[in-house]
Image: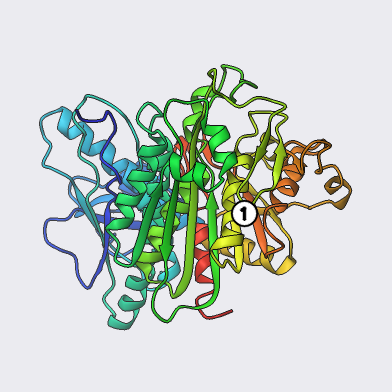
Amino acid sequence: MSTPVPTLPTTLPDVEVAASVRGGLPLVVLSRSSADGPPLLGPGGNDLGADWASAVALSGRAGEVQPGPADSAAAWVLGVGEGTAADWRAAGAALVCAVDARAAADTDSGRGTGRPGVALVLPPDAGPEEAAQFARGLSLGGYRFRVTGEEQKPRLRTARLVVSEPDRRAEVAAAVSRATALAAATAFARDLANTPSNVKDPAWLARTAARAAGKVPGLDAVVRDEEWLAEHGFGGVIAVGGGSERPPRLLHLTWAPPGAGGPHLVLVGKGITFDTGGISIKPADGMHLMRTDMSGGAAVIAAMIAVARLGLPVRVTALVPCAENHVSGSAYRPGDVVRHYGGRTTEVTNTDAEGRMVLADALAYAAAELGADVLLDVATLTGAMKISLGLRTGGLFADSAALADRVVEAGARAGESWWRMPLLDEWAEHVPSDIADVRQCPPGPGGITAALFLREFTAGLPWAHLDIAGPARADRPYDDVVPGATGFAARTLVEFVDSYAAGA
């Protein structure tokens, strides 16, 4: 029986760089805003005419899309504003939405001709960065995840960026190729997080990720079941997953290319496929969004696939503990004491703080068994970070300024915002428990105390914790983000790994 979800991964438009416009592709003419006159038109805009531009009030602002006049070769006129990176990204996102909308309307009216394509000539001052941002907007701005019985409408298939100069074309092509690989990682992370939890149980998540990894040469995947987890002492994962009839899993991905230098990085992602809160049950309002509570794990999975596809010469391992936090007679309880991998014990005080329980096992395992040099975990961990930083910035905790700076810089290159939060010593003294080694939810500021709890399982290794509870989901579109799972952190992780490629 087929599952009621779209085929994963979502197919994104192909963005190709070529020397000339291919016959039959509709032409897109670029327009740029001007502070002291009418908008400036790019290649192909000579026959548009001032009267037409005035009639449609053409402004050239970023993301403005106008159908070209009937007597012109231009099918679309697309604004790129002042030409900043954000403007080019907005233009790409707006164009794909306009093309998709027209294709859907044409199909409904019986005029559909299959998946459409477009071509545009990049102006001389548009370099690799502008082209990369445009490609990212094109790739992600039209992303949709919808479970439906209706036939899928045609979407943008191909966008051809025309660059005549060979040297410049090669630079633009390389930048576009990297941008589309990062966009694919973001989209796959969105796919995994958006998948409804009646389909996405721990076994499905681990199996789907392993299948996708298996298609990338050199990327190895192993899935551990609940018997292996119990035998090897993953008490946090077993406790959290114990309330569900769908047992937990551990996904283990390995990328170890020949000649890889630098430190061994281990990425850990929270893979809670649905979170009721357990016995400390959540309010009904908003619980349906808990299908995205494995967004940290999704980001790690997608980033690993991108790292391997890009062939980054860095040794990286990923661990994604997958569990469903449910309510039943076998659910773990407040007041329980749980023994984690390696023997450290935790006093449970709130079963809705399940993410840190599964991360603790994975971090301890990575430190003790995998020869990790650097640990980094990603999780939708605390509502406190949503309150502190809002919905578009991730919380960053790190035990060194150098590691924190590396993450922030990776995020800047990826177009994802991070804010370093403090690991305050005055709250660390509240982490120990009276009846166990540590307590799950120490009193104090929630995001900070959660990070301090996780630090207890890192064996003193360099470590960073990324709390993405805010930016992992969106309820309205912005930039190239659409409502639903955002795929936040996937691109940052790829850039973070790449920062070690030169042995820095």
Residue 220 in view (yes/no): yes
Tell me: residue 222, above or below residue 164.
above
Residue in front for this viewpoint, 87 or 324: 324
Please name the residue shown 67% across and 34% down the image: 383
Residue 439 appears left or right of 212: right
Residue in front for this viewpoint, 439 or 190: 439
Tell me: residue 97, above or below residue 184.
above
Residue 65 in view (yes/no): no
Tell me: residue 290, above or below residue 295.
above
Q: Position of residue 31 (x, y in %)?
A: 38, 56
Residue in front for this viewpoint, 417 or 480: 417
Residue 325 appears left or right of 51: right
Quadrant of image for the C terminus: bottom right
Label 1: few (<14), some or many (≥20) within 10 Å? many
Q: Position of residue 232 (x, y in %)?
A: 52, 48
Residue 215 appears left or right of 317: left
Q: Tag 1, which secondary structure?
A: helix
Please name the residue shown 36% across and 54% down the image: 184
Residue that numbered label 1 is attached to: 364
Q: Which residue lies furthest to the front in this view?
A: 231
Query: Is the image coloured rainbow, by chain, by secondary structure, or in one colour?
Result: rainbow
Q: Where is residue 218 in the image (x, y as percent from the top left)?
A: 33, 67
Q: Quadrant of residue 337?
A: top right
Please name the residue shown 56% across and 44% down the image: 234
Please name the residue shown 40% across and 33% down the image: 201
Q: Where is residue 362 in the image (x, y as percent from the top left)?
A: 56, 51
Tell me the amino acid under the disc marked 1.
Answer: Ala
Tell me: residue 164, above or below residue 326.
below
Residue in front for this viewpoint, 69 or 465: 465
Residue 405 appears left or right of 29: right
Quadrant of image for the N terminus: top left
